[in-house]
Amino acid sequence: MTNQQQPVAQEHALDRDCKTLSRHVLEQFQSFSAEAQDLSAIMNRIALAAKLISRRLSRAGLMAGVLGFTGEVNVQGESVKKMDVYANEVFISVFKQSGLVCRLASEELEEPYYIPENCPIGRYTLLYDPIDGSSNVDINLNVGSIFSIRQQEGNDIDGEARDLLQDGRNQIAGGYILYGPSTILVYSIGNGVHSFILDPSLGEFILSQENIQIPKHGPVYSTNEGNFWQWNEAIRDYTRYVHRHEGYTARYSGALVGDLHRILLQGGVFIYPGTVKKPEGKLRLLYETAPLAFLVEQAGGKASTGTQDILDVVPEKLHARTPLIIGSKEDVDLVESFIQDRARRDSDEAVVAGS
Ligand code: FBP
């Protein structure tokens, strides 16, 4: 590198090191409006939550009483991990005294949590899954956090949070944090999908990729085939198809965020369908599938229940669940085509049986 080039390279490196998350959000708005400042501040608080959780995860095995179960069962009917509780409290704490978020809705809380000092000025609601992939926490495999930001409509006096029961196109922002070899934060405010890596030496999330576009097709299919006999015939048909055709490979980490991050960068499809026991599926709409659908659509991909776009689903309750088929457009279309074929066959057979 010549002497002339060195200062330019140093300037680039410095400029990149200064591309922090809060600055990037403001640049996205190309303005310093109140909304831009608010979103930038909210994203900064989410980044702080990510740093605290990442630090705890990285040292969990050396600390007493941090791993394992609490003995409690949450609103989902799932046994609660101590890390679930810690991460949930972190998200609440980082928004205290912020004047930004009046209400938080979490996978770990039956009812929304209100931060009185932020209401009514706080015009936003944060919906989040503090630890996604809880079954991976105690064995040091990747986990994540998922978040969605929505406008607070009305004062929600009765605490029923009915204004949250709207489709996913109402989200202002969505994203996830992946706690893996490095901690990555991926977000969108409806203007492309961008990823940041936590630089521990700076304690800052630094821009790593802008305007991520998901490949139209990818070799990966990600699903828990252990549920094969609980699935409907259409999903079984699709699984038989990928088993019998070259070019497909199975990857399933046990953490949706980890599997989706792979698919966002390399293409493919993640499937968590309804089952005989849970026709509505396992994953929750407002703080798992809708924020990820928001991201993936922004990246040129697709997210479906099998018969409807996830972003068009209107929930009946705060912890509503949906089947999820998400990823590259061509791969989601393929899964949907098996569902349509099966539906057509079933109705033809019904007509024959009826005649
Ligand atoms: P949690 O948010 O409670 O972890 O549940 C979601 C999840 O762990 C996803 O991350 C993952 O894809 C899926 O459930 C795993 O479910 P299963 O163990 O049934 O395959």
Image (cartoon, rainbow, N blue to C red):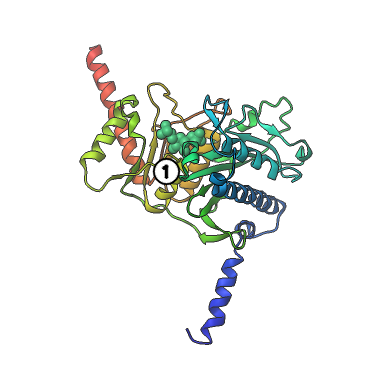
- In the rendered image, residue 171, in percent from the top left (x then y), is placed at 58, 41
Residue drawn at point x = 40 percent, y = 21 percent = 277
Report the label total: 1
Residue drawn at point x = 68 percent, y = 33 percent = 113
Q: Can the viewer see residue 312 in this picture?
A: no
Q: Amino acid at mark 1?
A: Lys
Q: Nearer the viewer, residue 43 or 330?
A: 43
Query: Which image quarter is the C terminus in?
Result: top left
- In the rendered image, residue 47, in percent from the top left (x then y), is placed at 62, 51
Residue 94 appears in which quarter of the rendering? top right
Q: Nearer the viewer, residue 25 or 51?
A: 51
Residue linked to disc 1: 302
Q: Residue furthest bottom?
A: 3
The answer to whether residue 7 is left or right of residue 247 is: right
Q: Is residue 10 above or below residue 260?
A: below
- In the rendered image, residue 21, in percent from the top left (x then y), is placed at 61, 57
Pointer 1 residue Cβ closer than 8 Å to ligand 1: no
Q: Can the viewer see residue 216 in this picture?
A: yes
Assign a secondary structure to mark 1: strand
- In the rendered image, residue 311, in percent from the top left (x then y), is placed at 50, 38
Q: Is residue 318 above or below residue 145?
A: above
Residue 146 appears in which quarter of the rendering? top right
The answer to whether residue 175 is left or right of residue 31 is: left
Residue 337 appears in which quarter of the rendering? top left
The answer to whether residue 115 is left or right of residue 67 is: right
Question: Dot 1: few (<14), some (14–19), or many (≥20) neighbours within 10 Å?
Answer: many
Q: Residue furthest right?
A: 117
Residue drawn at point x = 42 percent, y = 39 percent = 254
Residue drawn at point x = 40 percent, y = 27 percent = 274
Q: Nearer the viewer, residue 74 or 327?
A: 74
